[in-house]
């Protein structure tokens, strides 16, 4: 049997995933195209506006960038901000080319 | 022998907080509560009370500061009235939901619009469903004693306690008050033990978003959902009844004064009609009962001391033998009747108590209500009951309604 929390007021220890896998909330997912991505093209740390703007902090500023889909809520801000239009929002469940 | 001083209700409240060794006070002045905050600031500034007085820009913040300080383990106090209490409303829910043993005085005053600075109880009555324990005091002695008891109750149950007393009628009226001995108070009130220790070593997310269903946290421990947390609050309010009664008895043992646990009685043993109410209007009703007794009407008074948790069993017991109840209330649930009237009738449901219940709305916005007027209302209710009018709409006493 699972251990049960006996607190009389609600509290939680800060941890990754404390609020559950928030990626479950997503309707659309970001799809990244390295051919249009500035750091990928230049092969050096540049731009990373997606990383800067992501309100969930689920984008890693690496080459190529990495998006953690377990926690990405699909807000689309990265796609909106990307100057190279390298991120496209695709309906969940829909195949992309 | 304990010291007796002549003092106002607000002085009694400030002294009660001081004797309870509060560590943080955050309050914002509002008539008629202002002098509570002034006296406490003098105690702290003069070094008589070792506490932090935190100046804030609003009542909402005053209670927020108390919530924060209580969370990290301080015994806290605040006081307010009327619009100030309404401005705290959101944080009242927050304090109860966080299960913090805050004690606050509500110096009862009417609410606007239109503006009034004078007494009635609409302010605290309209906070009925916030999850706070509400105690209504009938004299200045009960204020100082109830604050001390309030901390004992709050800290035993982790439920905030609102000590209510009538503005001006008590807050600014001087009465003899026996000041409890400081050492006895310390024995009566052990230091506050917070239910959670918040420290940099054990960082915690307090009151995070809870989802409708129970859910395991990141460590796999099953945590309550919102509804379970709320059930715990309701259960604790129910259980607090015994703690309130026990605190009253322990206080009587230590200090020799018993204000009653949930309700108090005045000449009810043979009463054919019982007058009831909360706070000073119930005190006034005792004089009215004496007047009626002089005319041969066996009247008594049941004062409702604790409004939440509601003293269901106590009122069933108190009204079982009488023939009529006349309720005087300084507030109303608009569109229905006095809140106390509704609660009493609900408590009788399912029992064999079938009483005529007459409800009078009195003293709104400071309108004076005298014992002889209460007595006259009882006489007229008796006549109405005799002619078969057992449950009329609430009547507005001393009010020009046509």
Image: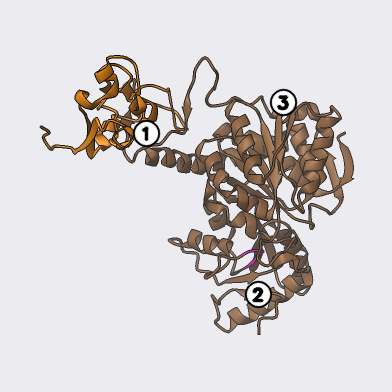
Chain colours: A orange, B brown
Provide the residue designation for mark 2: B396
Give the mark nearer the N terminus: 3 vs 2.
Answer: 3
Distance, label 1 to label 2, CA atoms, is 47 Å
Q: In which quarter of the image is residue B168?
A: bottom right
Chain letter for mark 2: B
Q: What stretch is highlighted in magenta?
A: B327-331
Residue B131 location (% of width, % of height): 53, 45
Distance, label 1 to label 3, CA atoms, is 36 Å
Q: Quadrant of residue B381?
A: bottom right
Chain letter for mark 1: B
Which of the pair B11/B83 is nearer the observer?
B83
Residue found at x 64% / y 77%: B382
The residue most toward the front is A42
Provide the residue designation for mark 3: B187
As drawn, B234 above or below A52? below
Residue B18 location (% of width, % of height): 77, 33
Provide the residue designation for mark 1: B224
Between circles 3 and 2, the one closer to the viewer is 2
The answer to whether the residue labelled 1 contacts the one labelled 3, judged by CB atoms less than 8 Å apart, is no
Residue found at x 32% / y 24%: A59
Residue B248 location (% of width, % of height): 66, 40
Where's the C terminus of chain A, which quadrant?
top left
Q: What element carries label 3?
A: helix
Give the mark nearer the N terminus: 1 vs 2.
Answer: 1
């Amino acid at each position: 049997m699972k251990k049960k929390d006996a607190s009389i007021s609600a509290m939680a220890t800060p941890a990754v995933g404390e609020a559950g896998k928030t990626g479950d909330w997503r309707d659309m997912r970001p799809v990244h195209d390295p051919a249009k991505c500035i750091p990928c093209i230049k092969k050096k740390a540049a731009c990373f506006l997606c990383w800067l703007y992501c309100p969930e902090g689920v984008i890693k500023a690496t080459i190529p960038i990495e998006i953690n889909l377990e926690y990405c809520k699909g807000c689309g801000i990265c796609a909106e901000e990307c100057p190279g239009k390298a991120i496209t929002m695709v309906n969940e469940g829909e195949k992309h080319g | 022998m304990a010291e007796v001083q002549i003092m106002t209700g607000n002085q009694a409240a400030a002294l009660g907080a001081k004797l309870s060794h509060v560590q943080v006070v955050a309050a914002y002045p509002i008539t008629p509560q202002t002098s509570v905050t002034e006296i406490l600031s003098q105690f702290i500034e003069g070094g008589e009370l070792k506490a932090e007085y935190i100046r804030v820009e609003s009542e909402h913040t005053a209670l927020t500061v108390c919530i924060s300080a209580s969370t990290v383990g301080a015994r806290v106090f605040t006081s307010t009235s009327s619009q100030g209490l309404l401005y705290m409303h959101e944080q009242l829910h927050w304090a109860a939901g966080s299960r913090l043993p805050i004690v606050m005085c509500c110096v009862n005053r009417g609410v606007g619009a239109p503006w009034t600075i004078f007494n009635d109880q609409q302010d605290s009555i309209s906070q009925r469903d916030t999850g706070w324990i509400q105690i209504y005091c009938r004299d200045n002695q009960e204020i100082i004693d109830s604050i001390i008891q309030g901390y004992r109750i709050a800290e035993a149950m982790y439920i905030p306690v609102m000590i209510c007393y009538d503005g001006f009628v008590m807050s600014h009226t001087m009465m003899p008050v026996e000041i409890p001995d400081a050492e006895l108070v310390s024995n009566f009130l052990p230091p506050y033990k917070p239910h959670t220790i918040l420290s940099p070593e054990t960082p915690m997310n307090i009151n995070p978003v809870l989802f409708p269903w129970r859910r395991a946290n990141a460590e796999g421990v099953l945590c309550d959902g919102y509804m379970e947390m709320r059930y715990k609050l309701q259960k604790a309010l129910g259980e607090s009844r015994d703690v309130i009664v026990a605190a009253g008895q322990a206080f009587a043992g230590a200090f020799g004064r018993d204000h009653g646990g949930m309700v108090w009685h005045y000449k009810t043993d043979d009463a054919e009609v019982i007058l009831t109410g909360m706070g000073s209007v119930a005190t006034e009703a005792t004089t009215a009962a004496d007047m009626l007794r002089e005319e041969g009407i066996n009247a008594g008074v049941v004062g409702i001391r604790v409004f939440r948790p509601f003293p269901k069993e106590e009122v069933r017991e108190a009204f079982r033998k009488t023939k009529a109840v006349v309720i005087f209330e300084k507030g109303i649930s608009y569109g229905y009747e006095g809140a106390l009237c509704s609660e009493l009738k609900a408590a009788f449901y399912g029992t064999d108590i079938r009483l005529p219940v007459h409800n009078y709305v009195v003293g709104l916005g400071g309108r004076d209500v005298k014992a002889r007027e209460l007595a006259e209302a009882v006489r007229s209710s008796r006549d109405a009951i005799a002619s078969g009018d057992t449950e009329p709409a609430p009547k507005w006493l001393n009010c020009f309604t046509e």
